[in-house]
Amino acid sequence: MTTTSTPPTTAIAATIPVRLYLSDTDPEDPRVEQRIVTGWPVAPGLAINVTHEYGQRLDGRYSLTHLPSGQALARRLCARHVDQAAVAAIATGVDWSADVEQVIADERTRPLHPGRADWDWCGYDEFCRAEAYPRPDSPTYPSSR
């Protein structure tokens, strides 16, 4: 009797294009730049993508981006903290597919504002290290569940 085993398959993480609106408020050279990058959808209207800053891709640092506006809700986070930010954003119950003005006006987003969020200290923790996203234990990404 012969037994054969099938090698385990790993799920390929589905990605989507994410349009970023990057701005530089330098008084000498103010500008807004549009860039399309690859991201991972986590909820309608939200995606996680590698952070881009000053024209550079910051591998191992991630942003939680509001898709309709192309603006980051949280940025320069390690994979663990960007997951935490995504879980918190989803838990608010906000319609993230709405336009940015409607989202900003929604009081439920207050805990996500800079200075109020648990992940604001990301990078000061010895466990914040550059790692690939999605993490195998990611609570927000379907292929890791």
Image: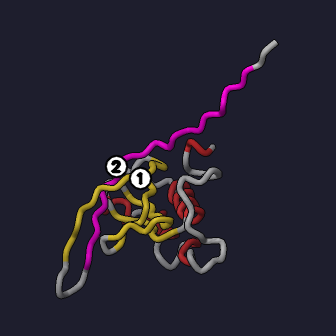
Q: How is the image coloured?
A: secondary structure
Residue at 59% from the left image edge and 54% from the top image edge? 135
Disc 2 residue type (three-letter)? Pro
Mark 2 Cα shell of 10 Å, populated few (<14), some (14-19), many (≥20): some
Quarter location, residue 48 = bottom left
Disc 1 residue type (three-letter)? Gly
Front-lying residue, 1 or 99: 1
Position of 49 with respect to 5 (left or right) is: left
Measured along the vertical axis of the image, is residue 98 above or below residue 127? above
SS at mark 2 in the image: strand
Residue with the most extreme front position: 2
Count the numbered circles shown. 2
SS at mark 1 in the image: strand
Q: Which mark is residue 39?
A: 1
Residue at 63% from the left image edge and 50% from the top image edge? 136
Residue with the most extreme top position: 1
Residue 108 among magenta residues? no
Quarter location, residue 87 = bottom right
Residue 18 among magenta residues? yes
Q: Which residues are magenta?
A: 4-24
Front-lying residue, 145 or 66: 145
Mark 1 Cα shell of 10 Å, populated few (<14), some (14-19), many (≥20): many
Mark 1 in CB contact with mark 2 (< 8 angstroms):
yes
